[in-house]
Amino acid sequence: MRSRFVVLSLVVAAAITCWLTQRSAADNPNRAQVGKKIDNVKFTDITGKTFALYDLKDKKAIVLVFLSFECPVSTSYSQPLAEMAKDYERLGVSFIGLSTNQDDTVAELQKQVKECALNFPVALDRNFVVANAVKAEITPEVFVLDGNYVLQYRGRIDDGYYARLKKSHEITKHDLKQVLAEIVSGRPVSVSATEAIGCVIPRKAFEKLGNVTYYKDVLPILQNNCQQCHRPGEVGPFSLLTYRQAVNWATDIKDFTQSRLMPPWKINDGMSFHNERRLTNRELAVLAAWADSNTPEGDPKDAPAPVKFADGWKLGQPDLVLTVSDEFQIGPTGNDVFRCFVMPTNLPEDKYVAAVECRPGNPKIVHHSLIYIDTQGQGQKLQKLQQEKPTKDPHGGSDLDKGPGYYGGMSVGFVPNGSLGGWVPGQMPRVLPDGIGILLPKNSDVVMQIHYHRNGRLEKDKTQVGLYFAKKKIEHQYQGGVMAGIFLVIPKDKKDFVVKGTSYFTQDATLYTITPHMHMLGKEIKVTVTPPEGKEQLVFDIKAWDYNWQETYFFSEPLKIKAGTKIDLQAIYDNSKDNPSNPFNPPQDVALGEQTFNEMCFVFMGGVSDSKGQQLPMTRYPKKKN
């Protein structure tokens, strides 16, 4: 109990400190060097060209942009910066990019600049010479100098982010454009400093010794819990394979693990599930102590062997591989994309599926997927309509988004005939027990919704789904069950709107999976079961719902359900202006529905019973007593 109290105290203290720090920074942005003439620093760009700041004569303004190609906030501004550099060049404004990653080689930097399509000179700021001259602290952060090399503005590019990795609903202040317009037109700069939001430029000296060291204590934790996603080519926005990379993100590692935002496991309490991505109290304490003690390196001899990550299909070659018909392209900027793809199975006979594995073609941008069965060809109709008469992405996309599929809102646009589960990074495929399988009718289609997130680059993806058929005689068809939270409208300005739902099992059953589902207003959700003549048991409790991290949870031990068992859900929604995920600003009444601007409350279950058909034996009404 004491250890839990200590960890809770640390989390609360960290949250309070973070809030106070952010508020202080917002109220008092860094004004260092503002109004001063900057030294004649020198640059060597990725082409090998060397020049000095004062060589940029007769310029009305010079914009120094500090970048990190490992920082997702920084890379997300690649296209806007390139567009501004092009637009303002004719007005006498020069842009210079400075990469602060000391490990980058010129070749690596050239590759990164090309991928981000930057059209202005970019140099590696060796030993932080330029960063020290202007006292830069964040990437991305811009420094605007006038024609006399006097710093007139430092801070953010715009208000596209309200916190680290948290995008605003809309951009209302274009700070850099405003400053450039003022300087170019000869007007005084109205705002000389704003808070830059992004990733800290690491400058601290590295320690070789310490009680908690990277190689002995921290690296094993990162290998077991982080590197699956945080490595080149995977969905993690930065890598955590080396000491230097871990140092660059040490503060974030501490903050995100202490708050339990990482590793991404949303369940706070309840029953045991397979593949739980949780850190122990000891692991949390180790990561915090390492960050707080100046990230000591230790002895490389203490390092465990590098992890060898499996390539290809994790369960071996599937019996049937379904592939999206062509590459889907997403642009570098805009809101996230939710795209549905139809993949015909062309099966001449019914099959039973024992396992499903999703294999993203481009893990850097595939955030999660939901996979459904369609026996009526409804997905094909929607896809054909989208391809013949393209419609605008309801989430607010990019003109560069193009390819197969269609937009289905927060779902697939119709009521599917069954589900093959979902996938999120870090989730491992599981095989159903012998004798159990999911019915996949002949000639049915598999419809997959993919959530793509943008990374500041033009990207393409062609995801595959592998199906593994049951090899033994099917004794029980895998059945689905759904319990709904009852509501019609979530009123605007309600911070804690409670939705409840109840169902009863009419026969004995065994549950293997459970999947909660809400949209953007979701805040909390929990499920309990109460056996007949028994005590209520907590199945799961999620205190911080996040649509972006929904997944199917596999019980470590199948949950045995007796006939007459009551199952309850309770969900809480936040339809206030304080909810950064609220799709409306200002808030509006939100109705039940499957579109982006609607809301839902469902808990899906998967299991078996002695009843026939595809549905678990459930009802909304208790059995009447004689």
Image (cartoon, grey):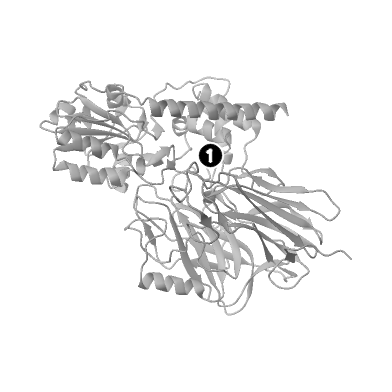
Which sits in the foreground, 338 or 623? Answer: 623
Q: Position of residue 230 (x, y in %)?
A: 49, 42
The three-letter amino acid code for the residue at tag 1 is Pro
Q: Position of residue 483 (x, y in %)?
A: 67, 60
Residue in the picture at 79% in, 62% down: 622
Residue 286 appears in the picture as rendered: no
**Residue reaching furthest to the right:** 626
- SS under mark 1: loop
**Residue reaching furthest to the bottom:** 348
Q: Which residue is mark 1?
A: 306
Q: Determine whether, in the image, residue 489 is placed left or right of residue 609.
A: left
Q: Determine whether, in the image, residue 535 is placed left or right of residue 280.
A: right
Give the total of numbered labels: 1
Please identify the quarter of the rendering in which residue 222 is found.
top right
Which sits in the foreground, 614 or 619? Answer: 619
Q: Is residue 1 above or below residue 485?
A: above
Residue in the picture at 24% in, 38% down: 178
Q: Position of residue 319 (x, y in %)?
A: 58, 68
Residue 536 appears in the picture as rendered: yes
Q: Quadrant of the C terminus?
A: bottom right
Which sits in the foreground, 157 or 430? Answer: 157
Q: Determine whether, in the image, residue 179 is placed left or right of residue 358.
A: left
Q: Determine whether, in the image, residue 440 is placed left or right of residue 112.
A: right
